[in-house]
Image (tube, rainbow, N blue to C red):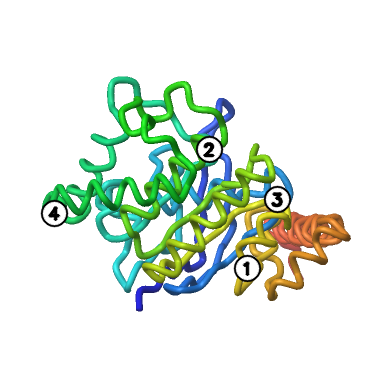
Amino acid sequence: MSTLEIKDLHVSVETEQGAKQILRGVNLVIKQGETHAIMGPNGSGKSTLAYAIAGHPKYKVTSGSILLDGEEMTTLSVDARARAGLFLAMQYPVEIPGVTVTNFLRTAKTAIDGSAPPLRGWIKDVKTSMTALRMDSTFAERNVNEGFSGGEKKRNEILQLELLKPKIAVLDETDSGLDVDALKIVSEGVNRAKANTDVGVLLITHYNRILRYITPDFVHVFVAGQVVESGGPELAVQLENDGYDVYVAASAAAASAIASAEASDAAAASAPAVNA
C-alpha cells in the first residue's frame, strides 16, 4: 500500500513584491484507497499545496518534506514525480494545440510505465473510459482541451486518471464550473478509478456538493496555509452550514498573538543593557 506523507511543509511563491510564504507547516498522510477532502476559503493555500506536490517550479519548498513511499519528492522533476505515482487534475486544465487526446494519453502512459501499452487492449480501455465519461469518440482526435467546455476539460482530466492509474491523485477543485449532470459523471469516474486501482485521493474543494457523490474518509479544514482541523464526512456538512468564519477568526487571532510575541522578543533583544 502506497502512502503520501506531507511533513511540516512550508512553501513560498514569487510575486512582484518578492517571495510570499503561503504554506506554513502542513502535515498530512494519505494512503492508497483513502479519500481526503481539503476544504477552505479562497486564498488559504489549497491550490498551492496541489502544485507543490506536483512540482510546479513557481512554488518553492522552503522546508519540510513530501514523501511517497518514503522517497523524497521535492528533489524530483515533475515527470519523475508522475512516474513515481503522483497525479494532478488541474483546476484550470491547459490547452495543448497540435497534440491530440489519443497521442497525449498513449505518450503519457508509455512514459509512466516505461513501455508502450499493447495497442489493441489500450484502444479498448480508452473507448471504455470515454464511454463511461459520456465523451464522444471524436474527442480522441481533437487537440487536448482545445475548444473544450469547462465540463469537457474536467472529464478529460478524469479520463487521464482512469487510464494512467496513479498511486495518489490530487484533484484541485475538479467540481469547479460543473453543472449537476457533469458533476455526477466526473464523480462516478473518480469512484470508478478508486474501485479499479485503489488510488488514494486528495480532493480539494470549496463545497460539500461533490462530497455527496465522492464520500471522503477524512475532511481537513485549510486556513492561512495550515490544516486547522480534521474530521470525518460530518465536518464537511458542518462547514456547509456554518462556513469558515470561526476558523478564519481563530487563525487570525493566533497569528496576531505570535506576531505580538515576536515583536516583544525583538524589542527585548534590542533594549540596552542596564548595569547593576
Which residue corresponds to mark 2? 19
- Residue shown at the point (64%, 45%) measured from the top left: 181
In which image quadrant can residue 20 be found? Answer: top right
Q: Which mark is residue 114?
A: 4
How far apart are labels 3 and 1 at the CA level?
Answer: 15 Å
How far apart are labels 3 and 2 at the CA level?
Answer: 26 Å
How far apart are labels 4 and 2 at the CA level?
Answer: 37 Å
Q: Which mark is residue 215?
A: 1
In the rendered structure, which disc, 3 or 2, sits on the residue that comes first in sequence?
Answer: 2
How far apart are labels 1 and 2 at the CA level?
Answer: 37 Å
Q: Amino acid at mark 2?
A: Ala
Relative to 250, is 50 on the left or the right?
left
Q: Secondary structure at mark 1?
A: loop
Q: Quick one: quadrant of the C terminus?
A: bottom right
In which image quadrant can residue 66 be found? Answer: bottom left
Relative to 275, is 45 on the left or the right?
left
Q: Secondary structure at mark 4?
A: loop
In the rendered structure, which disc, 4 or 2, sits on the residue that comes first in sequence?
Answer: 2
Eyeballing the image, is 58 above or below 225?
above
In the rendered structure, which disc, 3 or 1, sits on the residue that comes first in sequence?
Answer: 3
Tell which residue pokes out farthest to the bottom in this image. 1
- Residue shown at the point (38%, 50%) measured from the top left: 129
Q: Secondary structure at mark 3?
A: loop
Cβ atoms at labels 3 and 2 below 8 Å apart = no
How far apart are labels 4 and 3 at the CA level?
Answer: 37 Å
Residue 47 coordinates in the image, percent (x, y): 56, 46
Q: Which mark is residue 192?
A: none
Which residue corresponds to mark 3? 206
How far apart are labels 4 and 1 at the CA level?
Answer: 33 Å
Looking at the image, which is closer to me, 174 or 80? 174
Which one is in front in this view, the residue at disc 4 or the one at disc 1? 1
Q: Amino acid at mark 4?
A: Gly
